[in-house]
Image (cartoon, rainbow, N blue to C red):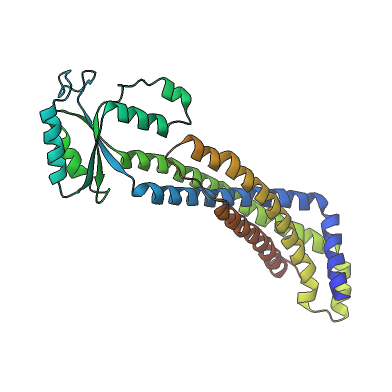
Amino acid sequence: MRVQFVMQEIWIGLRRNLTMTISLVITVAIAMALFGTGLLLRQQVAASKDYWYDKIEVSIFLCAKTSSNANCQKQDVTDQQRSEIKAQLEKMPQVSNVQYENKQQAFARFKDRFAGSPGFVQSTREGDIPDSFRVKLKNPEEYKPVAQAMLGHPGVDTVINEQEILKKFFKILNGLQAAALGIALIQVIASVLLVGNTVRLSAFNRRRETGIMRLVGASNTYIQLPFILEGAIAGLIGGVFASVLLVLSKKLLIDRLAGTVQLVSQLGWFQVIMVIIVSICFGVLLCAASSFLTLRRYLKI
């Protein structure tokens, strides 16, 4: 009988405040979806960093007739200069491995890496990418000594550190994550205020019933339970809608990002499911706690 009464009171409360309940569900859904998206982006950045950290290389592009660098003097690198550069790189303590890549190999690797961008590949011809040495460092952070030793060396056109490119890219992803979490925080505050107003209105509409319950000896917990569960159920429904939005976010944002930008590793469904569970639990606890605190702070029932 007690369970039936509590469920009946929950249904009455949700039905009487239908418009506010719908508003609460929508607000919670948006807040949890943005919160979950922020977590997904954070995991994407972490996974991509772990994946690419060991693959970071320093590319030392050699002189070609098309080079604009004055050091090259519009001439291709000579065999002697190429040998001297390789020998100097192999002697450096920061260097783990040195691999020479000619124009044909560079173009083949370029087509493989940017296979998802056919327009970009078609606009590049074989020979546009000069010969280079791909240098693997023992510690990717020790880039400057290698760059300083190679810049200005006869036969060297430019030195590119892939880590600097990755840092800029991950900075953009971190900015997206911060924006999603910032908007989610605003939505969470709105959710808390809506929960408080919904619970207060619901308690006011049922003040006669709660007064009778108190007269017959019902405990505070028993009286407050339907109101708290109302908020929790609204949070649960909002969390379910948020899970749908997170699946769409994974398919339309994260997967497209991984497919378009070759620097991003694929995020698995296990991480998405864990984020969905965390988001739903957070939504339910947020609404239940807001209901409880509202009842204790503002209402005398």
74 lies above or below 105: above
Q: Position of residue 80 (x, y in %)?
A: 10, 29
Q: Residue at x 26, y 45 (%)?
A: 136
Q: Is residue 180 left or right of residue 152?
A: right
Q: Is residue 301 visible?
A: no
**Which of 103 and 121 lies nearest the eye of the viewer?**
103
| Residue ID at (44%, 37%) | 262
Name the residue rendered at 45%, 51% in the picture: 47
* Horizontal side of residue 198 vs 136, given as left or right: right
Screen quadrant of the C terminus: bottom right
Front residue of this view, candidates 177 and 73: 73
Q: Image quarter for residue 10?
A: bottom right
| Residue 282 as seen in the image, left or right of residue 134 | right
52 left or right of 258 in image: left
Closer to the camera, 145 or 210? 145
The percent position of residue 13, horizontal first and vertical second, equals 83, 60
Q: Residue at x 77, y 65 (%)?
A: 227
